[in-house]
């Protein structure tokens, strides 16, 4: 079977060895005579997988013991509400740094729960082309927390530095660049990330949270929405998305095998540099709308001279088994998502196609 060159923004591709492992184990998991899908989330067979997945997150990111590692459901969109429900008490406000469509949604949802304010925005005519500078941040020193979105899938921008937010807890939605490289977990009070970009399939969210933050969270909200509930039950308070977590285990096990996140970062930078070079070398035909210092290594967005040419580009690329290249419906253009599982050979194939298409257009 010829694998497609998968540039989808998510759900995205998974490493072939992780899928092949799932294929081998699908009908009979470790001699139990059952698929992992059929095992009870309370049983020893699944519990071992669950704990291994948590341990791999801790190991690969060097997560301090003072942090919980949680697997939750509902996607990052549920976290937009769950976060302020837990951490935004009456009489306090939270700061949100707006850098794209998903940060806007997080801000709007939090506003339904409590008081929020915009600490910075780089929107111009509803479009974002850069990350704000430190001197553009207007922060409330008494904020319950400061929220940022580390990578912006729609507009192709990414934080390459951390904002100084003083003593306020820093919260990050890392859904689209979680584990693209190492990062210092201790710089954040809480990180959340949908798995379906870099580390697994859809259906599960990873949350890294300071234990003291969770201990001090609100307790006047429904039990199922309390971080403390899931922390106390090892993310098994209710039936977990067992197959999604199993696949995270497979992906992270493979990541460790090939050299961990240092190797993943090396591959990701190599892919991004190749594609951006192809764009920059032909500025009369390809245009990157993102300022160079804010360019994302995960979602590379660019434009062609006309929308008609962009539609042709996407259609012809699809015939060459390159899928997922159309920009988001709200932004248009071209978007190539270069998540961890996208091989360098796929990016090289895309670059060769871009050069040929520009000559023919």
Image (tube, rainbow, N blue to C red):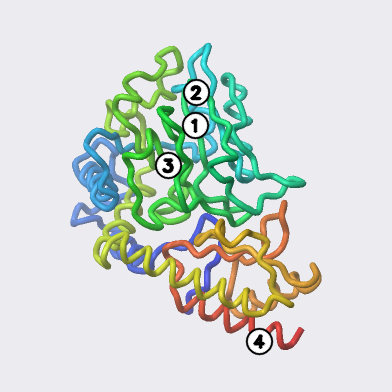
Where residue 315 sits in the image (x, y, percent)?
Answer: 70, 74
Which of marks 4 and 1 precedes in the sequence? 1
How would you rate the neighbour count of disc 3 (Cα within 10 Å): few for under 14, some for 14-19, many for 20 or more? many
- Residue 127: where, in percent of width, then height? 71, 49
Please identify, in this view, whether the residue under mark 1 or under mark 4 is nearer the observer: 1
What residue is at 64 percent from the left and 76 percent from the top? 317
Q: Tell me which residue sits at (35%, 25%) in the image.
A: 213
Q: What residue is drawn where x is 45% and y is 18%?
A: 222
Residue 49 versus residue 156 in the image, above or below: above
Question: Mark 3 — residue?
Answer: 205
Q: CA distance from mark 3 to mark 1?
A: 20 Å
**Label 3, label 2: how far apart the Cα atoms are:** 25 Å
Q: CA distance from mark 3 to mark 4?
A: 40 Å
Is residue 179 positioned above or below 86 on the image?
A: below
Q: Which mark is residue 146?
A: 1
Q: Earlier in the sequence, mark 4 or mark 2?
A: 2
Q: Is residue 27 above or below residue 228?
A: below
Proximity of marks 1 and 2: CB atoms separated by less than 8 Å: yes
Residue 181 image-quadrant placement: bottom left
Q: Identify which residue is drawn at 62% across, 59% down.
A: 291
Q: Residues within 10 Å of mark 1 (few under 14, many from 20)?
A: many
74 is higher (above) or lower (below) than 159:
above
Nearer-N-terminus badge (3/1): 1
Q: Residue furthest front?
A: 135
Q: Which mark is residue 356?
A: 4
**Any mark on residue 143, and which?**
2
Quadrant in the picture for residue 311: bottom right
Horizontal side, residue 199 vs residue 64: left or right: right
Mark pair 1, 2: CA separation: 7 Å
Residue 179, position as x, y percentages in the image: 38, 54
Query: Secondary structure under badge 4?
Result: helix
């Amino acid at each position: 079977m010829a694998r497609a060159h998968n540039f989808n923004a998510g759900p995205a591709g998974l490493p072939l060895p992780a899928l092949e492992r799932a294929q081998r184990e699908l009908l009979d998991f470790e001699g139990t005579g059952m698929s992992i899908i059929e095992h009870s989330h309370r049983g020893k067979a699944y519990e071992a997988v669950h704990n291994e997945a948590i341990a791999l997150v801790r190991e690969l990111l060097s997560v301090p013991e003072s942090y919980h590692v949680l697997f939750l459901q509902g996607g990052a969109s549920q976290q937009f509400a769950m976060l302020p429900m837990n951490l935004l008490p009456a009489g306090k406000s939270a700061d949100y740094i707006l850098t794209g469509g998903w940060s806007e949604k997080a801000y709007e949802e939090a506003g339904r729960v409590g008081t929020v304010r915009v600490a910075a925005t780089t929107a111009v005519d509803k479009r974002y082309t850069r990350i704000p500078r430190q001197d553009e941040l207007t922060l409330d020193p008494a904020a319950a927390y400061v929220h940022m979105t580390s990578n912006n899938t729609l507009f192709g921008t990414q934080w390459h530095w951390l904002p100084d937010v003083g003593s306020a807890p820093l919260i990050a939605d890392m859904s689209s660049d979680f584990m693209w490289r190492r990062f210092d977990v201790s710089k954040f009070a809480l990180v959340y990330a949908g798995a379906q970009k870099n580390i697994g399939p859809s259906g599960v969210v990873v949350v890294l949270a300071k234990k003291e933050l969770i201990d001090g969270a609100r307790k006047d909200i429904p039990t199922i929405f309390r971080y403390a509930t899931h922390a106390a039950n090892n993310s098994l308070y209710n039936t977990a998305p067992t197959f999604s977590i199993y696949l995270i285990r497979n992906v992270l096990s493979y990541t460790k095998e090939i050299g961990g996140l240092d190797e993943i970062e090396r591959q990701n930078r190599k892919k991004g540099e190749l594609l951006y070079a192809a764009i920059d070398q032909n500025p009369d035909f390809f245009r990157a709308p993102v300022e160079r210092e804010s360019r994302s290594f995960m979602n590379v967005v660019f434009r062609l001279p006309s929308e008609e040419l962009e539609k042709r580009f996407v259609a012809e690329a699809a015939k060459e088994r390159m899928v997922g290249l159309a920009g988001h419906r709200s932004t248009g253009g071209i978007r190539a998502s270069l998540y961890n599982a996208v091989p360098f050979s796929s990016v090289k194939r895309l670059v060769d196609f871009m050069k040929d298409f520009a000559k023919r257009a």
